[in-house]
Amino acid sequence: MKKLDDSVQEQVMLFGQRVRQLRKMAVYTQGEFAKECNIPREQIGRIERGEINTSIGNLFTISKILGISPTKMLDFSNLDIDRKNILDGRV
């Protein structure tokens, strides 16, 4: 698999954190959420950990299940994360 450049990897990790934040706010377990999204639980976990750059289709599916626009899914301003530690894998 081709390695993502650091700026893209940071966005992938931030997206994963955003998915986790919103999933927990909606009171879904990973398993429940995966079932609702029709995405394997293991893949949801990999998305949340920023291990994979998921598809635009999954972005739309996830946002629909969470009742939020895709644009707001990509708003990382409310994440409580030390961005300096993201690429070091400490998040």
Image (cartoon, rainbow, N blue to C red):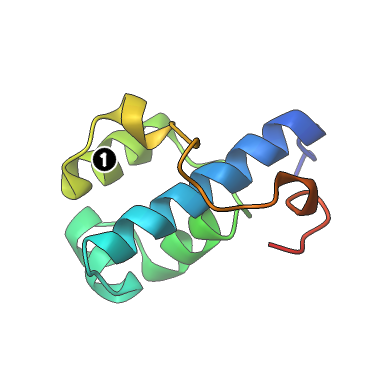
Q: Which residue is mark 1?
A: 63
Q: Which residue is drawn at the image coordinates 61% and 52% (left, top)?
A: 81
* Residue furthest to the right: 88
Q: Quadrant of the N terminus?
A: top right
**Element under label 1?**
helix
Q: Is residue 13 left or right of residue 86?
A: left
Q: Position of residue 33 (x, y in %)?
A: 26, 64
Q: Position of residue 64 (x, y in %)?
A: 18, 40
Q: Position of residue 38 (x, y in %)?
A: 24, 57
**Of the residues shown, which amino acid type is indicated by label 1?**
Ser
Q: Quadrant of the C terminus?
A: bottom right
How many residues crowd around disc 1 within 10 Å: few (fewer than 14), some, or many (20 or more)? many
Q: Which residue is drawn at the image coordinates 26% and 40% (left, top)?
A: 63
Q: Which residue is drawn at the image coordinates 48% and 65% (left, top)?
A: 45
Q: Position of residue 15 (x, y in %)?
A: 51, 43
Which image quarter: residue 21? bottom left
Q: Which residue is drawn at the image coordinates 49% and 37% (left, top)?
A: 76
Q: Is residue 4 left or right of residue 80?
A: right
Viewer-proximal residue among 77 and 86: 77
Viewer-proximal residue among 89 and 76: 76
The number of callouts visible is 1
Q: Is residue 2 left or right of residue 69?
A: right
